[in-house]
Amino acid sequence: MNKRLTCAILLAWSAIVCHADPYVGYIYPSGIQAGTTNRFIVGGQGLFGVQGFYFSGKGLHVLSIEKVPNFSPPTGMQRRHLVKWLDGIAAGDRNEPPLPNDPHLNEWRSNAWWSVLGTLDPQKLAIVERDLHVPKNALQATPSLRQMLLVTVAADADAPLGRSSFVGWGWNGISAPRYFEITAAPHIHEPMYVPPHRMQPEPPVADVRANTAVMLDGQIMPGSTDAFLLHLPGGRRTAFTVAARELQPFIGDAVPGFFNAVITLKDTQGNTIAVADDEARFRPDPVLEYVPPKDGLYRLEIHDVLYRGRADFVYSIAVGEARPRGKTTADGVVARPGATATRKFKIDTPGPRILEVTARRRGSPLDAVLTLRRTENGPILAQWDDVTNKLFTGTVPQSECDPIGFYDFTEPGEYLAEISDRTRHGGGSYVWWLDIRDPRPDFEVFSSRSTLSMTGGKPANITFRILRKDGFNGDVKLEFPQNLRVRNGVLTSAVDEVRTSLFYTGTRPAGIQPVKIFASATIGGTTVRHPVVPCDEYEQAFAWKHLVPAESFLMRCQPAPKKPAKRKTSRPAR
């Protein structure tokens, strides 16, 4: 390969990399207490072009952004020198030890932090030590998490509580959103990394005896188990609610494609008291409830079910008094394993009907099967199980588990719907709702990304996908704000998705702002208009594509750069 071709390939590759949107893989910790300030680790790819962060929640302020320098593997002698210096700092001496007599000293690799270890704060020192001491696991490492930023965020004392989202933006684009939570409860973080040859810190201690809640934050690294000590009140039911998959629903290069957490509660002698894996078979984040017989100290442990781990295996555990669960008003319940629930209904006039079961979509563990009969024990007229969806939406997709049936009733009269669990489970929580209705043709449109950074004249590519309901097969037109021009804005009846390009036609820079995109169609002579659901596409376990809904569309737009005015040249006199 000649030099000219090599240079061309490198320039083309650098152009692709430089124009890729930043990717935020995680933020640790995943939340902040109102009225406090904290420094967070943001990990991902393309982060060194990030200039700021946008939070959808009010009352949050970014005070500083600092790059964590990329660490190259040091030479053997260099590594020993750095470890010696770090051990000295841990012992109270921040001065650099004398350089060794190394004939390869000029080959030592440079790093902005290695040369100033004595000036680094504990968090930065822990980052350096983890890089030096933790073996690189090629199976669990990923280039998409190679870069880190240290971001200092302040939360107002009256900041609205709850979960919001944030994005990073800069000259290289805008990232997809990640979750971030403002809590009233204080946060307790796992201890910072300490290399194995030094004394390991004791687990942090949280006291929840005085009716107080607390948030426990951490990251699970390969093969590790995190632990916290808790003072629990006797006689009061305490809940431990984990958020892990909630924070990172889909991981493209891991099997299973998410952090599958397990929590264990032990006494001070190390005896296991209670264990929680999945909250339900379809919700991997565990919830554990326990009533201690007396006040005392307990140990809570968390790890991945397969003992995997890496930087984006971030979790938070809400610890507090368990709230009583309200009663759910439903059509029925599959009361015990293997049971079948029934509902009689009447058809007054012949014609097509839609029979739709809702269970998983409303939190029920029921994996429903719907059977239609004329009478009890009569012949089966129709039976429906899972829905074969052409797209999966949500953080834990469940709509495919709720059967939807189409049946053309030729005779009026009474009919019987039977609902059972596909796995023959059952219990008080296996509730269901059944809707029997005339067909209502409709549609829903989803986007493949919820954030766009556009410069006038240059296209921003985005895909829109349609979910057609109750036999709708018409064209759908996409509607955009006035300062956006679309190359192809119609989902025709022959397609289920359209990949299109947007162009910014405004003349002024527009900072990050939420926008609305709509989809409209004519159904039965009436114009039907729905907002497009903003989503971001993620891959799970090397295979499945999922659309994760976002709070809103966010766009950051710049006008096309002005072309330099042409110089007027005087014509020579004739």
Image: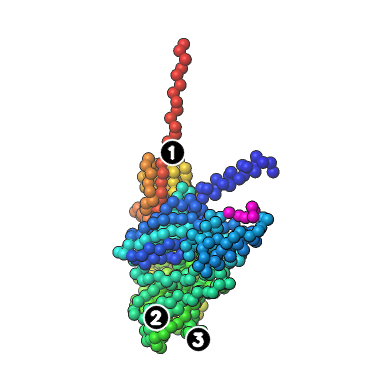
Whole-angstrom CA distance, mark 2 to mark 1, is: 59 Å
Say what amino acid the circle numbered 2 marks.
Answer: Thr
In contact (CB < 8 Å): disc 1 and disc 3: no
Which residue is label 3 attached to? 269
Is 147 left, or right, of 553 in this rendering?
A: right
Q: Nearer the viewer, mark 1 or mark 3?
A: 3
Dot placed on the residue nearer the N-terminal end, 1 or 3: 3
107 falls in the magenta region: yes
Is 128 left, or right, of 288 in this rendering?
A: right
Residue 222 visible? yes
Which residue is label 2 attached to? 238
Residue bounds of the magenta highlight: 105-110
Q: Is mark 2 on a helix, strand or loop?
A: strand
Q: Residue furthest bottom?
A: 293
Seen at 39% across and 80% down, the residue is: 238
Image coordinates for residue 366, horizontal then vertical, percent: 45, 75
Q: Is mark 3 on a helix, strand or loop?
A: loop
Q: Residue furthest right?
A: 1
Seen at 47% across and 84% down, the residue is: 267
Classify mark 2: residues with Cα within 10 Å, few (<14), some (14-19) or many (20+).
many
Is 60 left, or right, of 446 in this rendering?
A: left
* Image height of 320 relative to 312, above or below: below
Which residue is label 1 attached to? 561
Seen at 59% across and 60% down, the residue is: 98
Seen at 46% across and 17% down, the residue is: 571
* Image height of 115 relative to 327, above or below: above
Judge by depth and name the residue closer to the eye, 470 or 32. Answer: 32
Dot placed on the residue nearer the N-terminal end, 3 or 2: 2
Judge by depth and name the residue closer to the eye, 225 or 340. Answer: 225
532 falls in the magenta region: no
Say what amino acid the circle numbered 3 marks.
Answer: Gln
